[in-house]
Amino acid sequence: MLKKELENVAKEALRASRALAVLSTSAKNAVLKDMARALLSSKAVILKANKKDIALSRGKGRAFIDRLTLTPERIKQMAGSLLDIAKLKDPIGEVMRQWKRPNGLRINKVRSPIGVIAIIYESRPNVTSDCIGLCFKSGNSVILRGGSESLNSNIAIYNALSHVMRKHRVPCGAINLIATRERKAVDILLKLNDYIDLVIPRGGEELINKVVRSSRIPVIKHYKGICHVYVDDWADLNMAERICFNAKVERPGVCNAMESMLVHRDVAARFLPGMLKKFRDAGVEIRGCALTRKIAKWAKAATEKDYRTEYLDLILSVKVVNDLDEAILHINDHGSRHSDTIVTEDKDNALKFLARVDSACVYVNASTRFTDGNQFGMGAEIGISTDKLHARGPMGLEELTTYKYMVFGSGQIRE
């Protein structure tokens, strides 16, 4: 029964995607603005549903609850993201390149929707509205399968937004929520390659690995964020302290938070005592190398596993390195190709770091916490891709498109 239901959902999504592909920009923007208003007017219902989810998730840890929790301010931000998406340029129909052949054929490479996108995610209910907004503006149908821990919140958000779609007579199937706790729903979705064009998993490593193993559909992976900040020997140490503290403490339970701090040996004695005390006062547990523990005897000894762990909590691995080359080697070997920062006043060191660190987002003198679709001016994001094909880093409207060749002739035949 469930298999048939999901197949019907996917068929409807495919049919709707063909209508969305030619929907005008003005029509899409009108829907998005109404969606933003609907979130705000449904705030009480959404918060009540979210409280149910939180009550059912007690004991799952501070970072988990933080990702799950909605507040009036977060709902306001969700609505703001939809309004921001409405303001963005519509990518559909953009002529990426055009040229004329000697035989007179005029060839246009034109941006077009991918089609039907399935998004499988955990915990964060704001993902529901962000993904609906981005997929809709980029002309794609979307099938959402959120985690059971946020099911009540997701249903409340989806109901508010789907009401707007019906009001504007958007084709049935444009947005879909799989509102079941049955785990086999994911396995079924991943086999519907006749109808679904792309799968995007967002969540823990276990979820993503399962999707990759099981899917018959192309997958863009959003793996863990083992993000680094490297404090160079040419760093402004006051700036480094502000950046490192923000990257770790501002919101530790998200994928763009710093998980490992690297410090050049020549500045370790000046930088680490004050920095580590500030972290300790903020409740951060430090797991450090031998030199780190020599400076902060209260720190725990770091293991090799610690340097490969995404904590999503107030825990930080720290390592003193001999030079920039060692820092780059450590990041490329231990990181997850997500987001990494160098703090330095040396231009050559900055350029070397940017060129050699193999991550989706590489920063000079800025917090890793900026790796976010909204912060990049994308309105929102589907997620942070750690793949290299077909998208990398924050995925906004353009990353949810492909292209087609539109060829204009005047009777040419190939001889």
Image (tube, grey):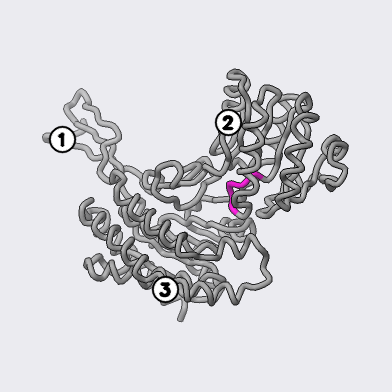
Which picture quadrant has residue 54? bottom right
Residue 322 placement (x, y as % from top left): 78, 26
Which quarter of the figure is the N terminus placed in? bottom left
The reply to whether dot 2 and dot 1 touch (C-beta < 8 Å) is no
Report whether residue 138 is seen.
Answer: no
Image-based side of 78 in relation to 327, left or right? left
Residue bearing mark 1 = 409
Element class at badge 3: helix
User: In x, y percent, where is residue 198?
Assistant: 44, 55
Q: Quadrant of residue 118?
A: bottom left
Q: Are marks 3 and 2 in contact (CB under 8 Å)?
A: no
Magenta stretch, overall SS? loop
- Residue at (72% x, 43% y) in the render: 278
Q: Which residue is mark 3?
A: 44
Please, what is the three-letter code of the amino acid marked with disc 3?
A: Ala
Reading the image, the residue beneath label 2 is 365
Magenta-colored span: 254-258
The relative height of residue 124 versus residue 46 in the rendered view (above or below) is above
* Residue contact at pointers 3 and 1, CB within 8 angstroms: no
**For the view shown, which residue lies furthest in the left direction?**
410
Please tell me whether mark 3 or mark 2 is closer to you in this view: 3
Q: Amino acid at mark 2?
A: Asn
Q: Residue at x 42, y 51 (%)?
A: 380
In the visual, does 404 lie left or right of 377?
Answer: left
Q: Quadrant of residue 115?
A: bottom left
